Image (spheres, grey):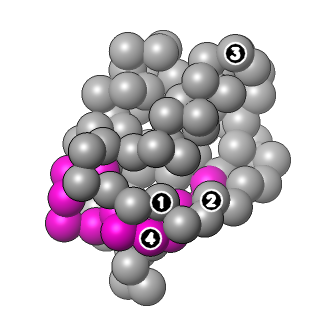
Amino acid sequence: MNARRVVIAGRVQRIGYRQWMVAEARRLGVDGWVRNRADGTVEALVAGDIAAVQALLSACRRGPLLARVDTITEEFVEPPDQPGFRRLPDA
């Protein structure tokens, strides 16, 4: 299983980015979570087969209609303990 922690910067809060990401992840069968951070970025842990994770990360570079994604940083991590994809409380 391929797992990555990503931090997405740009215009990504207060526009439905997290809810959009939950829907995309579930559609692709990716496990993990997403949350807003106090610094204005969105953080996520995404895990699944390589093709599904890559498809989600590619979609995240575009984001939903009102988003403007400036940068995405990625690092390899351990997969989540729970299956499914959910929205966590803000960090």
The disc, 3 or 4, on the residue closer to the chain's N-terminal end is 4
2 to the left or right of 67: right
Q: How crowded is mark 1: few (under 14 residues within 10 Å), some or many (20 or more)?
A: some
Is residue 7 rendered magenta in the image? yes
Q: Which of marks 3 and 4 is in front?
A: 4
Which residue appears at 30% of the width and 43% of the height?
64
Residue range in magenta is 6-17
- Please tell me the numbered disc located at residue 10: 4
Q: Mark 3 points at which residue?
A: 51
Mark 4–mark 1 contact, CB under 8 Å?
yes
Instruction: Pick the residue in front: 74 or 78.
Output: 74
Could you give the CA–CA distance between mark 3 and mark 4, rounded to whole angstroms?
A: 25 Å
Q: Mark 2 points at which residue?
A: 72
The disc, 3 or 2, on the residue closer to the chain's N-terminal end is 3
The amino acid type of the residue labelled 2 equals Ile
Q: How crowded is mark 3: few (under 14 residues within 10 Å), some or many (20 or more)?
A: few
Q: Position of residue 47 (x, y in %)?
A: 63, 30
Could you give the CA–CA distance between mark 4 and mark 1, rounded to whole angstroms?
A: 5 Å
The disc, 1 or 3, on the residue closer to the chain's N-terminal end is 3
Count of numbered badges drawn on the protein:
4
